[in-house]
Image (spheres, helix red, strand yellow):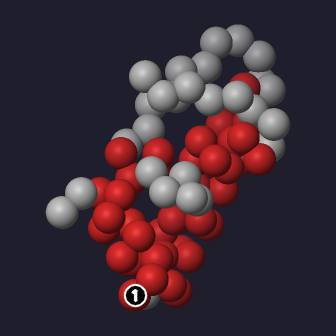
Amino acid sequence: KSSERFIEEMRVKTPALYAVSHPQRNRWWAAKIDELLNGGGATFVLLGNNHVLGPDSVPVSLTRRGIATRLV
C-alpha cells in the first residue's frame, strides 16, 4: 500500500487520529521552518515521505504561509 493511499485512508477512517498526526503536526513544522528561515543564515530542511504527501502536507502548509517549496 502506498504512503499516499495510507494517509488518505487514515483521513477518512480515523479523522481524529489524522487531525493530530498530519494537519496539526505539519502546521507546527511549517511554523518552525518559517521561524528558521527568518532567523538568518542558511537553512536546510529534509522531510520524511509522510510529511510531504497529502492535502495537509508541510509543503502545502508552507505555501499557505507564502513560502515557496520545491520537492527534490
Task: Locate residue 22 relative to residue 6 in the image: left or right.
Answer: right
Q: Which residue is mark 1?
A: 13
Q: Based on the displayed image, in which of its 4 quarters is residue 70 positioned?
A: top right
Image point (59%, 42%), residue name: 59
The residue located at (64%, 12%) in the rendering is 42
Q: Tell me the kind of residue under disc 1.
A: Lys
Give 70 or 17, whichever is nearer the viewer.
Answer: 70
Q: Residue at (38%, 66%) from the top-left corner?
A: 7
Question: Residue at the top extreme?
Answer: 41
SS class of the residue under badge 1? helix
> Compared with residue 10, is residue 63 higher up or lower down, i.e. above or below?
above
Residue at far left of view: 1
| Crowd band around label 1 with a 10 angstrom C-alpha radius: few (<14), some (14–19), many (20+) | few
Name which quarter of the figure residue 46 lies in: top left
Q: Is residue 26 left or right of residue 71?
A: right
Camera sees residue 30:
no
Task: Locate residue 61, reporting x and y percent.
Answer: 67, 49
Measured from the top left, where is residue 38 in percent x and y?
Answer: 80, 26
Dividing the image into 4 quarters, which one contains the C terminus? top left
The answer to whether 50 is drawn above or below residue 11 in the figure is above
Residue 40 seen from this side = yes
Task: Tell me which residue sits at (40%, 87%) in the image.
Answer: 13
> Residue 16 location in percent, x, y?
52, 86
